[in-house]
């Protein structure tokens, strides 16, 4: 088998692998998940954290840090990181809140999907209409019984 044939075989196998339903479903899930993550990040950063900041008197968690060296004299996190090592607990707190919100929203979405699935399963399914042959045979049987 030549190198060219091996390349074609590998390309064909890859194409078959990539076109399987599970791989395509996974790719769609990852893309939708990334878009959903951006929405939740915006929700946390642009809606929830400002509300928390307003309730706590203008507190902005993202700039809270503890300097780990005497060289750090900056008052905001970006400049402090340039000056030396800092413990950015505010960023960690923001990301933790973000995670909790994402997990809660996913819980709500999955809960709603499961409720729809249960409702769908609970709905009685009408039995299929018998075929014309079965109806005819049923009529003949009933006539013979008479």
Image: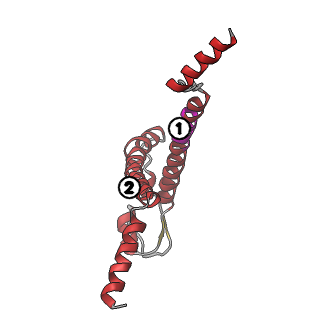
Q: Residues within 10 Å of mark 2 (few under 14, many from 20)?
A: few
Q: Position of residue 138 (x, y in %)?
A: 60, 19
For mark 1, give the secondary structure: helix
Q: Nearer the viewer, residue 83 or 126?
A: 126
According to the picture, the residue beneath numbered tag 2 turns out to be 31
Is 6 left or right of 98, judged from the image as shown?
Answer: left
The majority secondary structure of the magenta stretch comes to helix
Q: How packed is label 1: few (under 14 Cα within 10 Å), some, or many (20 or more)? A: few
The x, y position of residue 93, in whole percent, is 51, 55
Above or below 119: residue 41: below
Whole-percent x, y for residue 19 in the image: 39, 62
The residue at which mark 1 appears reads as 113
Vertical relation: 7 (above or below) 58: below
Residue furthest to the right in view is: 145
Quarter of the rendering occupied by the C terminus: top right
Q: Earlier in the sequence, mark 2 or mark 1?
A: 2
Q: Nearer the viewer, residue 78 or 106?
A: 106
Which residue lies most toward the bottom here? 2
Q: Nearer the viewer, residue 30 or 35?
A: 30
Residue depicted at x 61% and y 28%: 122
- In the image, the segment drawn in magenta is 107-116
């Amino acid at each position: 088998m030549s190198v060219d044939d091996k390349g074609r075989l590998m390309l064909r196998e890859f194409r078959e692998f990539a076109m399987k339903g599970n791989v395509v479903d996974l790719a769609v899930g990852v893309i939708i998940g990334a878009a959903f993550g951006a929405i939740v990040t915006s929700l946390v950063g642009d809606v929830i954290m400002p509300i928390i900041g307003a309730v706590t008197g203008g507190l902005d968690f993202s700039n809270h840090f503890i300097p780990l060296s005497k060289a750090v004299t900056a008052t905001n996190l970006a400049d402090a990181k340039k000056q030396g090592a800092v413990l950015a607990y505010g960023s960690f707190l923001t990301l933790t809140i973000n995670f909790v919100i994402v997990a809660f929203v996913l819980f709500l979405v999955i809960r709603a999907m499961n409720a729809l699935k249960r409702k769908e399963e609970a709905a009685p399914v009408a039995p299929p209409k018998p075929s014309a042959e079965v109806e005819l045979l049923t009529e003949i049987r009933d006539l013979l019984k008479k």
